[in-house]
Amino acid sequence: MEKRYWKGVDELNNDPEFVRLRNNEFFEHLPLNESLQKKAESDSSTSRRDFLKFLGFSVAAASLAACDAPVKKAIPYVVKPEEITLGVPNYYASTFADGSDYCSVLIKTREGRPIKIEGNEMSSVTKGATNARVQASVLSLYDNARLQQPMAKKKRTEWNTIDAEITAKLTEQAAAGKKIAVVTSSMYSPSGKRALSDFIAKYPTASHVVYDAVSYYGMLKGNELSFGKSVIPSYSIDKAEVIVSFNADFLQNWLSPIEFARQYGETRKLRKGKRTLSKHHQFESMLSLSGANADQRHKIKPSQQSAVIASLYNKVAALTGGTSVNATATPLDKSLDGIAKELVAAKGKSVVMSGSNDPNEQVMVNAINFLLGNYGSTINLDRTCNLKNSNDAAYAQLLSDMDNGSVGAVIFWNTNPAYTASNPKAFAATLAKVPVKISLSDREDETAQGCDYVCPDHHYLESWGDAEAYKGSFSLMQPTIRPLFNTRQAGESLLKWSGSAVADYYTYIRNTWNAVVFPMQNGMSSFDAFWNQSLRDGVFEASFVIGGATSFTGNVAAAADLLGKPAAGIELTIYEKAGLGNGAGGNNPWLHELPDPITKVCWDNYFAVLPAYAEKMGWRQGTVIEVKVGNSTVKGPVLLQPAMSDETIAVALGYGRTNCGKAGNNVGFNAYPLVSMTGGVQKYYASGVAVNKTVEDDYTFALTQTHHTMMGRDIVKETSLAAWLKDPKAGNAPELIASPEGPKTPEELDLWKTEDEPGFDRLNHAWGLGIDLNSCIGCGACVIACNAENNVPVVGKDEIGRAREMHWIRIDRYYTSDTTKENAEDKGLGKLDMYGEMEKPASDNPQIMFQPVMCQHCNHAPCETVCPVAATTHSSDGLNMMAYNRCVGTRYCANNCPYKVRRYNWFKYSDNDQFPYNMNDSLGKMVLNPDVTVRSRGVMEKCSMCIQRIQYGRLDAKKEGRRPKDGEIKTACAQGCPTNAIVFGDYNDPNSQISELFKDERSYHLLASVGTRPSVFYQTKVWNRTEEPVKNHHS
Amino acid sequence: MLRYVYRILTINALALSLIVIFQTSTQAQPNGEALFKANCTACHVVGEDVVVGPGLKNVHTKYKEDWLIKWIRNSQALVKAGDPQAVKVYEQFNKVAMTSFNLSDDEIKSIIGYIKTESEAAPAVAPTPQVAAGSDAKEGGSSLTLILVLLTLIILFVILNRVQKGLQRVINDRNGIPEPEKLTGKAGLKVWIRGNKKLIAFLFIAVSVVGSVAGWNALAGIGVNQNYAPDQPIKFSHQLHVTQNKIDCRYCHSGAEKSKNAGIPSPNLCMNCHKYVKKGPKYGTEEISKIYEAIGWDVDAQQYTGKTKPIKWIRVHNLPELAYFNHSQHVTVGGVACETCHGPVGEMEVMKQFSPLTMGWCIQCHRDTPVKMEGNGYYSEIHEKYKAKYGPDAKLTVEKLGGTECARCHY
């Protein structure tokens, strides 16, 4: 059976618009840009004659000006810091912890300026992995929208003044017996917690309330019901052979996605003699990143999930001798039999997860894991996860206290409830009733707008801090730049207001570590030595004794009876996107421009629905609908999303910010009002939703994928584990070309004689990239890593709509179609009909594949031969080079590139008011990598395989008189990849990882039949499925 | 005309005589001067001023030679021994102990001799700049000569032309040919043009050829700032520091070995010496005080004030931003001497751009220069491969190893 992949609904439907775009891959019409043109035309009174005069004058002026070189200043440090050598980066270990993600990181600084985030390989939690949000966090440091000084009643003020006022008011409120609440997002900083308790000691009426926009309170409660302790366990997905996830998008957002992605990646590798794969089942109603990667994806409606879990419990219980519970029958019961068997067969080596915030569902899931003996192996209740500790009940109580006037002061720290509230108006009214309102936000966000005082916090790259992500897993945060503005660490503000004897947070953290962390080790006797070591490493791992056996004390039957019942009608599921997450980093243009891994939409959220369902409802792509949950109505456009559950709408949080900054304000719409409180917990789905079609014009999305079709050719190769075990070349038949002498390999029919090419012998290095499609999860971390490393400009929604995105690496996402060449005959389809059908949505649950595509650095590059000015040439170490200053912008190369990886600078994206992103202001420009040119208008650009890193690493080796070590040089995408799916190396080094991988039978070149001989290769995707192996039509 | 010749001769003679004077004076005490500059200039000048230690003018008359030798060898021993003269000097100059010098008697004597000569000489005129001026004049001389020759030719041409015309008139008079009617204005021009077609054609071609060449050169020279020598905020002399004080380039430009940037030293590095060297030979305290102002050093109180003011040097070497250049690649790996690209910095009173820094200049060097492979483990294996490819005796230039590929410098 052969599968066809298609790029989107438009392709499946052969949408006329799509066909038009496909036929003109550089879709444009002159004049270039309506928005630019509109203004120019209406305002202009310039005649042709005037124009020529101006032209003549400016040419003359320019040439005169060019004769005199501008005087450039060179200003050295007055006192050069010892550790800084100009032009040599320094790396500092730190911690990214924004209340949503946790990641131990290394900060690359140049001349005291952080410019890039890398994963810290010394961390036992994240192990060097990152995600898109962590990669993009460096840009938030240079955000113009950050507050530059404390604000009192919307007026600028000084720290002394504001501290005096706040202290007086807090004292007054406490004396009056009024409650003081400090609202934070999940708090796992030991020093932060200590500062809070000091604060509470000073103001006895104070309390600490933890509120997360996306809550895990249900999970904490479920665990309390099950084990008597309100904790979240740690998961070791790398030890799991069978992974069952119920709407837990653990690769993208759930709990600790960076850590899980790295663990999951390990289970998906087929290297170094490892011949096993994890088996991943995902039950979900929308298409999540985890679902897209699952070996088997089971579509359910949100309200069915409880019943499916109960049913799975019964089946596992039947096999393991547990007691059964009442469960509603579901259509999935049959497949659950098989899953239960797989789970039981992998007893102790499986894991079941649920993304639900319903405590009873979590109890059921815990019971399943307990029956399977997973506690102590894949799940550890002793090594507790501190990353999520919000308390929905306490927060609800706080809101009602605020409402009835018993709260005298409220402090918001790293939380933005005015934006994330399900009823923003009601929240504003409630907040207004509190006499003293203080925000520690770094900007005048939605909540800070309603506060009297804003005491802006540092960015995390300017801060001292610490974190205990898991019990015993400590990490430190250290400043890598002097504070840019007159801001102050939130922790320090609290210390100030509590009148703490230690006024600076650095000393405070040191004291905490001296008292709490230092005694946990016995290797070092001096605290200073311990501190320096921990600060250098960024992490400290305490060893602790794992407690006794876990006993499950929950009442499964009771929990089962309390589960929600499957509902009829339209349902809504609410999720977070890969880029923006919960919306905290809403002003980060890199994240906005990161195409959603699944939908490939930039700069928007939407209501995703199944195309068949949309058709039934009379909706098209872009139809604006109103969705009503309870009393909240939210309006937004429809996006056709295959693989969705029927009668289900999915919507992403994190959009529709109104006060985060100019890049992020009013992008998309706010879906938080659709989150409801049920049974004391936040509920991220809804049944019985009312939907209304509006009469508004269809909305246009900025989609990156349909513009880059590969015309349905054989691009992603796949096979099944069983087939691969039998034949390691399964699914990877060589691509042969018909010739008069029979089928031949592209190499045999080569137009070029290799020996004629100077330098093709690659005497020194032969650089290349290997991409394992089996462990690539399509998350997009590489895209942002590349943005940061290579000064890739942000172009905005309009330009992306014109297919002018500038990303050097893209991740193609393909869906399968059920009609294949093999089964077309059975279906009685003729050739024409077959091709038509292959483009049609034959299946409502297609497989999804991801493929990162960057410049393939072809050794027989089609782009090089067509460049009229030799601006793109080949290097003797296998790189396709691009000399911007030589390029005259003919774009022949892009037309001739079979991979469509070349990007044209339609505009000057820096210092141009039309593109009001980071390259347009002096602050935002500080993020630029000084080793990479900022390209100007009219030139082509593309992936350079991070040539600056190659140059740097190679020079380092030369200076030390040795060959570069394998793994020493990494491209930004390879380093940022959470699953190590991308490997960079030297083919000429026989011991390098890349040489070893390339020898593997799974390796193939993209579009090998074109004969481009790329330096980049891919490895066949191997599914762990019971179905028959996929047959390749070439075999 | 003769004026110019005379001037050139005078300038040359002057310059030559200066060089002769300078050379004779140095030849008298070569040892002493060199030793003085190597060992003493950090703290002393031959003059009245106190730098760190006292000014040494006429020091040979104040103290006996024997005592001076002892003092220079080990001043502290003398002080400890209670030598009254030594104790007096020690206390007079803030009890700053003078470094001991392990020099022979003859060497110390030659230093004293040098001080004697210098003290007796009239207020010293820094000889070097004059030599420089002299050589400048010489350089200018060659182009002046060219202009002179041209001028002579033109004048000769004009005179001969007049003579010829005058003679013609005489002949015409004698033969009774009336003088032709003098045409003026347009008509005259027309007649002239008709009569000088060849000349005009020649001029036209000459002007267009010369114009094109000049235009081409002018355009090619845009952005090429060879010999760019801007005035700097501090009149820092490389000549003094490099040649006279023999400070290694990499003491101040330490990045050259480690980084792409050689770096301009920060004032705190200057203070390593200038905490003690408070006076320069040419500008006295004027220029050095600018360092103090930058770093916030209170000379009187001998302490830092904390008020700093960065020095805004004018950048001399402006490589275009689109080009990647790494000093450490050339200095540490390639073993290229600083002077190869930066020229005789030790002779530059004002720093100037010695090389054109054009791409052609870079490439030429990459084509000509063999890669220094011996002793570097990076090359040991590939050296054999390249030898096999290009022959055992072939010059393995940077170019052969891919050093002229675009992306080595442009990305």
Image: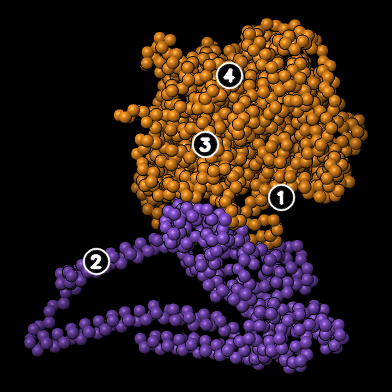
Chain colours: A orange, B purple
Q: Amino acid at mark 1?
A: Arg
Q: SS for tag 4? A: loop
Quadrant the C terminus of chain A occupies: top left
In the image, residue B84 above or below residue B140: below
- Quadrant of residue B165 in the image? bottom left
Disc 2 and disc 1 in contact, CB within 8 angstroms = no
With respect to residue A5, does A806 lie above or below? below
Residue type marked 2: Phe
Residue B380 location, x and y as percent? Answer: 54, 55
Report the chain holding disc 1.
A
For residue A998, the mark is 3
| Residue A1019 in picture, x, y percent from top left | 53, 31
In which quarter of the view is residue A985 placed?
A: top right
Q: Nearer the viewer, residue A8 or A918?
A: A8
Between the residue at mark 2 and the residue at mark 1, the CA separation in whole angstroms equals 67 Å
Which residue bears the numbered disc 1? Answer: A482
Which residue has dot 2 on it?
B204
Q: Where residue A389 sits in the image (x, y, percent)?
A: 78, 28
Looking at the rendered image, the disc whose residue lies closer to the viewer, 4 or 1, is 4
Q: Chain of mark 2?
A: B
Label 4 CA crowd tier, 10 Å (few <14, some 14–19, many 20+): some
- Secondary structure of the residue carrying numbered label 2: helix
Chain designation of label 4: A
